[in-house]
Image (tube, rainbow, N blue to C red):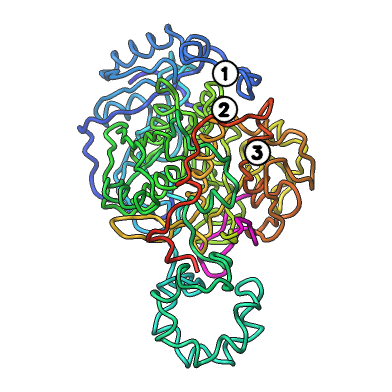
Amino acid sequence: MPDLVALPGSERTQLSGVQSAGQLNESETITVTLVLRRRAQVPAALVIGPETVTHEELDAQYGAETDDIALVTSTMTELGLTVTDTHQGSRRMMVSGTIAALSAAFGTTLTLVTSPQPGGTGEATHRYRSGSLSVPAQLAGIVTAVLGLDDRPVARPQFRRLTAAAASRTVTPETVTPETVTPETVTPETVTPETVTPETVTPETVTPETVTPETVTPETVTPETVTPEAAPPEAAPAASTAVPLTAPQVASLYNFPAGTDGTGQTIAIIELGGGYTQSDLDMYFSGLGLATPSVTAVGVDGGSNSPGQPSDGEVELDIQVAGAVAPKAAQLVYFAANTDQGFINAIAQAVHTTPPPIVVSISWGQSEDQWSEQSRNSMDSVFADAAALGVTVTVAAGDNGSSDDPNSTSGVHVDFPASSPHVLACGGTQLIGNLSTNTITSEVVWNELANNEGAGGGGVSDVFPLPSWQANVGVPTIAGGTSTGRGVPDVAGNADPVTGYLVVVDGKQQPIGGTSAVAPLWAGLIARLAQATGKKFGLLQPLIYGGVTPGAAAQGFNDITQGNNGAYSAGPGWDATTGLGSPNGQALLTHLSDPPATATATSTSTAEKPKHHWWQRHNH
């Protein structure tokens, strides 16, 4: 047995709901990831920007030491293990061996179990450990993480489908049918000033004279007769109430910069399951009058584009939202296993590819208290690399309100990786707009917790300290506590499934929401801002928080002041529900430009004002 010492931060507590799944085959060969220390810490000034480094500079100055790599290699060989790959810049070494040999080398016992999936539905079978890991004594302080021995699922996709109950509260072809609109359901008693309000239907279009059992019947109100084309000129503008939208409509309401379409930019997307089909993409983009963008699947550690799974909705949502708002940007979609090892390897591969993407979009996460310290720190260090390379990382803030728990509204937690200070955390709103005048008529915090339909995540981190750029914006103490930390989210966008995004999944058009949609929405915006300015933004927060004080709106944002996500309420300025607010793209471009930029790309009119296609049936 090697002389072992404890590996700090590797502790794992007992999982609840664990059941034995039989005998583990200890002769099976697996591969783990070792994360090594940096030769020097990345200076805070480099992470904050605006200066960036090249991959070569990052590797040489802040990657792993050559001597450390040599020592790890020789030690693993002595233990009967094999180093199969080394990435000096991201400080990762892949080591393979039997489960028995790896367990002995790192001082643990693995078992085979089933446990509940992080999303709260279903179970997974996986290797499992509790307690701490150890490393050979000569590697103490050199190896900072050992990932992949325990391969439990670590993250849930942050997307929400429109439920039947929520759909009943919207106006769509599915809810306006002969069965739902009848003389019995639409009467002077049911259509009253109390049930028909200025927020949902305007007084000019709904009056006792226009809405009667004689005028509203199964024959007169059908999916064929209630359309933008059939509505009279005096009717309420499309989407003046809570209805699903297309991504280009959302971008238009958010005033994404004209004359930009993502040309010359690359968006990386991280996926931990599921897949997409080319036929879905072609159907979606042709329906918007757009050419299907360049989308390339990249497998990580054996992961692959594997459609036909529940997570397909996440994958298709990410690709379609990003592609609809930045149709000329190329997309690299990284598929990895839903483990801490797979998640971190996928992000590292995306960030450290040459040339690096302009932005990485992540719509997967889990309450930060469910991660081991070594996993959080290893992933956060990759995000610091991204900032130094000029790569922005957008991350969904969660879909379960301030509890970040799909099974409970009590307690307060923020979601990781959104809580990392090196990513742009994206919260959720409910967006209602007048598409005829291209104006937002209502935008509040997304909160459908009362209907068990989710809410935007947000709060205060338990583990990451308050960043310098958030020091003066009024981040509160943790609800019910006395300490403060990194505030989540930074920004927000449309996420409520009721006003969600019309996408195509498995050949069917459907509305999907969640903060999952906000991460690729912001990724697309950042691609367009980069195109317009010619800049890499890296860590965006120092630029958008600059000069913001408690209660003051930030330049380039629509300040969200109404609603709550459970424990935290919206108000003027930054708050723990929607951060600085939703984007005003053109104003944000002006704010980020020095001097103000003039976009040089040819305007993509179809991205700004799509033709009438299948999705318009949903906007009444």
State which mark lies toward you, 2 or 3: 3
Q: Secondary structure at mark 2?
A: loop
Q: In x, y percent, where is residue 397? A: 55, 47
Rounded to the nearest whole Å, what is the CA distance between mark 2 and mark 3? 16 Å
Query: Which comes before the other along the chain, label 2 or label 3?
Result: 2
Residue numbers of the magenta segment: 437-458
Q: Amino acid at mark 1?
A: Thr
Residue 320 x/y as whole percent:
40, 47
Q: Earlier in the sequence, mark 1 or mark 2?
A: 1
Residue corresponding to mark 3: 588
Which quadrant of the view contains residue 323?
A: top left
The structure residue drawn at horizontal position 64% and vertical position 45%, both measured from the top left corner, is 584
Residue count near mark 2 (Cα–Cα under 10 Å), binned few <14, some 14–19, many ≥20: many
Q: Is residue 9 visible?
A: no
Rendering quarter of residue 357: top left
Q: CA distance from mark 1 to mark 2?
A: 8 Å
Q: Is residue 438 magenta?
A: yes
Q: Which residue is mark 2?
A: 538
Does label 1 or label 3 sit earlier along the sequence?
A: 1
